[in-house]
Amino acid sequence: MVERRPRRRPAGSEPDPPGTPTRRAALRLLDAVLRRGDPLDLAAHAATQGLAPADRAFAVAIASETLRWITDIDALIDSATAQILPDDVKSRAVLRIALAQLLALGSPAHAVVATALPLVAGGPRRLVHAILSRAQQDEWKLPERATLPLATAERWAEQWGLATLEAAEAGWSAPPPIDLSFAGDPVAAEWTDAVALAPRHLRLPRGQAVEAMPGFREGGWWVQDLAASLPARLLGDGGGRSVLDLCAAPGGKTMQLAAAGWAVVAVDSSAKRLDRLTDNMTRTGLAADVVQADIRSWEPAAPADAVLLDAPCSATGIFRRHPDVLHRIEAREIAELAALQTELLARAARWVKPGGALIYATCSLERAEGEDQVATFLTRNPAWRVDAVRADELPAAIAPDASGFVRTLPGVLGDAGGLDGFFIARLRAPAG
Ligand SMILES: C[S@@+](CC[C@H](N)C(=O)[O-])C[C@H]1O[C@@H](n2cnc3c(N)ncnc32)[C@H](O)[C@@H]1O
């Protein structure tokens, strides 16, 4: 009988180790953000198709941590190569996601290396292998604070100073805690590891599955950064009065306003985001009239007692949760969004009853989208005034600025987990 020897596979044709498709998805995500400028959460659906939910979440986590630490990871890569690898070569991308797993996510080295090498098939596998071995031998570590992209660091240092820049780097170095807003008062006994920083608010350590928290199905609360909850808080209780919630989806502020007794008309131009708003209202059992419209052309049936404009913005204030933002947003986008905000603020003001309040808010750390907008508005509408926010309307440790605005900067509540960066102004319409 002739003995048949197992046939050898040609080199490089071995099946990929388990977990490789997840890393391929992470590479696609990184490319979508860095090359195409797509938001990470929008790119995630297409980039992770075919993966199990846990693998999808891991691919997003790898991409997020790579984007958070990319400057520091690149410095490590460059310290180990004789010639600097170009920015856009596959080997650098593979090394970036591998080192993010190893150094930021604490993944086991053997899994990181085994899943990295197939990604550079046909390319410099030896170089990638050598750098990942060196990372382990030399016990590479990331610095304490993740370095911000240069353009952002320059912009923020100029606007807010070096101390705030350092606080931003500290805040950028880890995903933030989870804030919940409640429709009523939370039952303290159900939330033993939570801290209340404001009424109807609890802060929990990060890393918990939201759906598994007490009362998720019953809908008594929703996830909302404490800073994002401040604009609606500044309108107080509604007592049945009318409010236009402009740019409302996915509805964090709509839920707050409805829970505080306002009769809410929630307007947003995005059908998809309004679906999420409707789901949120259904889950929490709260009510609002929902309108899909572009507020540049829409008109309400009647003016309202109050208007809240949560304007579309660069979102640079939510950089801790969305590390892709600082890699996508440049001065040009900020200028374009600022022009849109000027237009939306002028329209929103027309729909406030005499003597009524107009809240203008953006989750941005750019003056062009905050202080400068209000200054332009007041110059063009001299009969309007700033209704200065008082310290007793805000959670302890958050103070209004000298103009009576709320500006949450990195560093505020730093020891308690920080806050998103927001600008909020309360403006008062002339009385009839
Ligand atoms: C900052 S988000 C709103 C977040 C929301 N207020 C919340 O608390 O959940 C901005 C929203 O503005 C909407 N938007 C952008 N341009 C708009 C326009 N011209 N008219 C109406 N909505 C617009 C976007 O679809 C987006 O949902």
Image: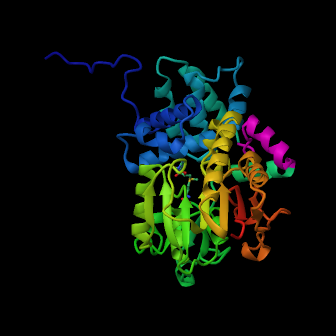
Horizontal and vertical percent for residue 233?
Answer: 64, 71
On the question of residue 347 being in view, the answer is yes
Which quadrant: the N terminus?
top left
* Side of 116 where 375 appears, left or right: right
Horizontal and vertical percent for residue 119?
Answer: 48, 27
On the question of residue 253 being in view, the answer is no
Residue 148, quarter of the rendered image: top right
Horizontal and vertical percent for residue 417?
Answer: 69, 62
Total marks in image: 0
Residue bounds of the magenta highlight: 142-162
Q: Residue at x 46, y 33 (%)?
A: 24
- Which residue occupies the foreground of this view, 413 or 170? 413
Q: Residue at x 59, y 61 (%)?
A: 351
- Which residue occupies the foreground of this view, 113 or 218? 218
Q: Residue furthest front?
A: 432
Q: Is residue 379 magenta?
A: no
Residue 149, quarter of the rendered image: top right
Q: Residue at x 48, y 46 (%)?
A: 58
Q: Is residue 152 magenta?
A: yes
Which quadrant: the C terminus?
bottom right
* Side of 399 where 200 appears, left or right: left
Q: Residue furthest left?
A: 1
Q: Residue at x 54, y 72 (%)?
A: 242
Q: How is the image coloured?
A: rainbow
Q: Decide: is 189 above or below 386.
A: below
